[in-house]
Image (tube, rainbow, N blue to C red):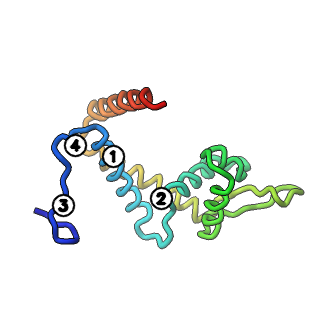
Amino acid sequence: MEKNTQGKAPCRPSREAREEIGFQAHRLHILCKRLVDQQAFGDLAEKPTKTQTWVINYLYENRGQDVFQRDIQEQFAVRRSTVTGILQLMEKNGWITREAVGEDARLKKILLTPQAIELHERVEESIRKTEEQLSQGLSPEEKAEFSRLCDKICRNAEGAVD
């Protein structure tokens, strides 16, 4: 029997819990996140938070447009003070720059640095590799069935949420 760091046998969920959809979904989420993070950020000194990764992705997807702090506030439904803190840390880590636009020095568009673009591309590649690992041994029919079941479960959950 394997032991945890304190020398005790690890806690195992009950058989009933292991068969619950919520437990399995959570377990799969944790494993997928761990795989993606390990592949994308394993060798980085500064690792982005989930929110910073979302902001990088949003900026990457909107590279052809001017993006301002208020756009990020609206996209992620967060307060100005929250976005200010996120962007300040991202700027400190070298992932974004802010550039004044026109005559209003207060209005600054947000740009990804080459470092952040590379980071985004590493995440995308990590997701692709993770997808390959997760799909090993699954037939196209099994993958389609899994997607169909996940969609059905999501509809059930969405119907139960206010």
Label 2: element kind? helix
Mark 4 and mark 2: Cα distance apart in space:
35 Å
| Circles 4 and 2: CB atoms closer than 8 Å | no
Left or right, 83 with reference to 146: right
The answer to which of marks 2 and 1 sits earlier in the sequence is: 1
The answer to which of marks 1 and 3 sits earlier in the sequence is: 3
Of labels 4 and 2, the one closer to you: 4
Identified at 58% across, 61% down, the residue is 116
Label placed on residue 10: 3
Disc 2 crowd rating (10 Å Cα; few below 14, some 14-19, many 20+) is some
Identified at 34% across, 52% down, the residue is 30
The answer to which of marks 4 and 3 sits earlier in the sequence is: 3
Residue kind at label 4, given as amino acid type: Ala
- Whole-percent x, y for residue 13 in the image: 20, 49
- Whole-percent x, y for residue 132 in the image: 33, 47
Mark 2 and mark 1: Cα distance apart in space:
24 Å
Label 3: element kind? loop
Disc 3 crowd rating (10 Å Cα; few below 14, some 14-19, many 20+) is few
Name the residue beneath numbered marker 1: 26
The answer to which of marks 1 and 4 sits earlier in the sequence is: 4
Label placed on residue 17: 4
